[in-house]
Image: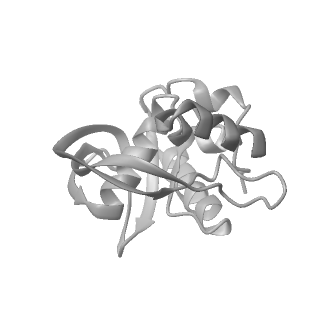
Amino acid sequence: MRDIRVVGDPVLRTPAEPVTGFDRELRHLIEEMFQAMYAVNGVGLAGPQIGVPKRLFVYDISGRKGHVVNPVLTVDDPEEVVDEEGCLSVPDRATGKPIYAPVARASGVTVEGVDRLERPVRIRARGSLARCFQHETEHLDGRLYVDRLPRNEARSIMLRA
């Protein structure tokens, strides 16, 4: 099973490349991503978080499970909702558990892409699923949730990570 990459690993700050091969290797990668996510009780995981700089993520949250390859995220409802958010790639050094902080996110989004068989995927999301899609898509752009925090909060979290 692949390890989760943590802050300091350059793959987390590098924009991911589009997936071009829709083959057995991709299907195996998606299964590995689910295994890695479940092993640490996560609800979403992007390719870069396991060292694969490809544009895909998996999720299992709020009764919805799936994956999106080459996702494009559109904000449907820009009203921001602030809620606690953490990241598997930003763990507390002392405990190994994600460090949580209040993060503002759009309340409604649509993600479009394809699945592992290159079939179109379009999902409208609100609530925790919308938050997950935004979080994972930002990973694909080389961003972390701490980038959305005030500088002093982000610095405090990074000192613990």
Q: Position of residue 67 (x, y in %)?
A: 39, 55
Q: Quadrant of the N terminus?
A: bottom right
> Most extreme residue toward the front, as rendered?
152
Q: Position of residue 149 (x, y in %)?
A: 50, 38
Rendered view: 22 above or below 141: below
Residue at screen point 65% across, 44% down: 50
Total residue callouts: 0
Using the image as rendered, state which of residue 128 and residue 29 is in the foreground.
128
Quarter residue 53 falls in: top right
Q: Position of residue 86 (x, y in %)?
A: 56, 54
Using the image as rendered, state which of residue 25 and residue 35 is in the foreground.
35
Using the image as rendered, state which of residue 73 and residue 118 is in the foreground.
73
> Most extreme residue toward the right, as rendered?
94
Rendered view: 36 above or below 79: below
Q: In the shown orientation, is residue 145 left or right of residue 104?
A: right
Residue at screen point 59% across, 26% down: 13
Q: Quadrant of the C terminus?
A: top right
Give the colour scheme of this rendering.
one colour
Whether residue 126 is visible here, answered yes or no, is yes
Q: In the shown orientation, is residue 153 left or right of residue 95?
A: left
Residue at screen point 42% across, 28% down: 18
Whether residue 68 is visible here, answered yes or no, is no
Residue at screen point 35% across, 76% down: 63
Q: Position of residue 99 (x, y in %)?
A: 65, 54
> Most extreme residue toward the left, as rendered?
76
Rendered view: 62 above or below 67: below
